Amino acid sequence: MIRSANAIHQPQDGLHWHWEDMLAAAKSDGMVKCLHTELFVDDSPRFLRTGGSADNANWLGKLRQLHPKLFIVIRLYHPAWWTLDPRAYAEHYHALLSRWRGHGFADRNVWQDPFVGVVPANEQNIERALGTGAACSWWNAPSDYRDRAVSEKFAHELMAGGMSSDRVAATVAGRPQILGDKVAWSIAEYRKIAAWNVAFWDRIDELEPNRKALAVWSALAQGHDCRPDAPESEFQIPEVAAAIRRCDVFNHHPYARWGMGAKDGPGEPDQFWGLLRGHRPKGWRDAREPGKPADPGGALALFGDMPYIAGECGTFKHSDPAWAERNMAAIDALWTADADTRRCLGSAVYIWHGHDDHRDNVIMHSPAFRNALRDSGRRAVEVAWPVARPGVGFGGAVVPPTPLPNPSPIPAPQPPAQPAPPTPLGVEPRIQVLPGEKSWLAVARRALGRQTVTMAEAAQLQAANPGALQVGAWLRSPWHRVTRTS
């Protein structure tokens, strides 16, 4: 079957502007991903405490009536999924999707649509704080990772989540922050995610044994390894691999971190840690960084026989009109790579419209990018359309393709190392901020004498120098030590 890899994530919170442009961007045989709250009038307020509107109810009917072969991916939403028995969660949403009703359209059972995919939850390995201040009660680690080595990608993730640079610096410097978010960080916690998803689909298939809609994996946030510096180790946990293969379709969320200054878009040095992370070849890191845990390749290599989607993708610069051309080139490169696999059912650019919590990725804030997506050519992909297999999923081997890193417990946190003080005859090393140096990264490059500097190193410099970066200021260096003068 020839289809399109083009895909868009539908607006949220009822912000349904330029609807026709969104469909033009997704193409008639591409993919649209949306929250279930955008498709149903009422989702039992006693259960979810949020409902749709009559306008929302038209959406599913409009999408299907206009484009019979459009792949509609529905992400179910509940703000505290971990508090619910997954079987009860499945029973509620089975009933809801079994009786979709829209004005002017016949009632329909969405579970019987072969061009619908259902995602039970979203990025379950990270959880935002609720209005009460409570975060996911399953996870033991606050999201500052103070119990494990802070990595460059963690600094990126903090800033992507909206944390200010000074708080990132404080975290990287080892001063604990108690944040609202929590993360899964151990094999045991990832096993909980796996079991929850398997229980959900087992119950759905008991209720809908002839299901035709596709079971889509609940995508994890990328880069949250269950072992330090062991990429994609969470996918090598046998229970997680089995839970993914219990679904019909794999799902991942590739992002570049351009909004944080990273160079991880297509064609850039860190492309296989950013937007093309899923496409990283097996062993790619091994020759470049010997001595580290074996690189099993990206998630698309680990599940190289499964059809897949990117339920979200982006650059964290979608809202900036000045980046429209670069954004379109990056997304086009991803779509092209996806088409080459012959397994991609769509990679959804996030997000057509949203509120401030998605402020870096709102496509509507950049008319040039919106128009480029609308006018983009169809990225044809030859793919065998998957068939739902209730009670089974895609199946296949669940043995990890490479051994997990040493499963010994992560050592207890240690206080940060303090630089040795200068001798009485010494001077404190200082670095002056030069004109044109507008970021901590720029100053860190000059101080360290190399072009490749990590976000963590830049944050160390900032932590040693509280306050704003100002041209002409003399900064304390956390790396150099001058002990004598002549």
Image (spheres, helix red, strand yellow):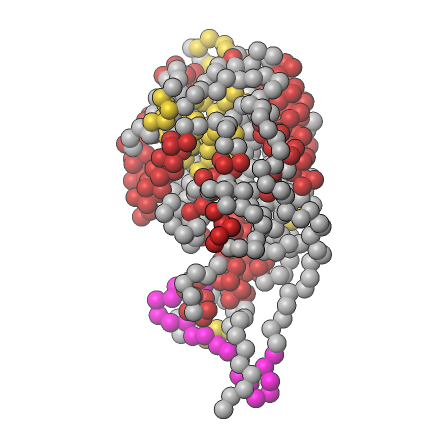
Q: Is the magenta stretch mostly helix, strand or loop?
A: loop
Can you see residue 8?
Answer: no
Q: Magenta segment: does it hold 253?
A: no
Would you identify the image quadrant in which residue 401 lies?
top right
Q: Magenta segment: does it hold 432?
A: yes
Would you identify the image quadrant in which residue 275 lies?
top left
Please report the residue visible at 46 percent of the width from the left and 42 percent of the height from the top.
280
Please report the residue visible at 71 percent of the width from the left and 50 percent of the height from the top.
409
Residue 168, image x, y percentages: 54, 57
Please report the residue visible at 48 percent of the width from the left and 27 percent of the height from the top.
307
Please report the residue visible at 42 percent of the width from the left and 66 percent of the height from the top.
450
Q: In this view, does 214 lie above or below 136?
A: above
Instruction: From the viewer's perspective, tell me whether residue 77 is left or right of residue 378.
Output: right
Residue 389, image x, y percentages: 56, 17
Can you see residue 318?
Answer: yes
Residue 60, image x, y percentages: 45, 19
Q: Is residue 295 above or below residue 457?
A: above
Residue 328, image x, y percentages: 33, 40
Name the residue nearer the viewer: 396 or 86. Answer: 396
Instruction: From the viewer's perspective, tell me whether residue 453 is left or right of residue 77.
Output: left
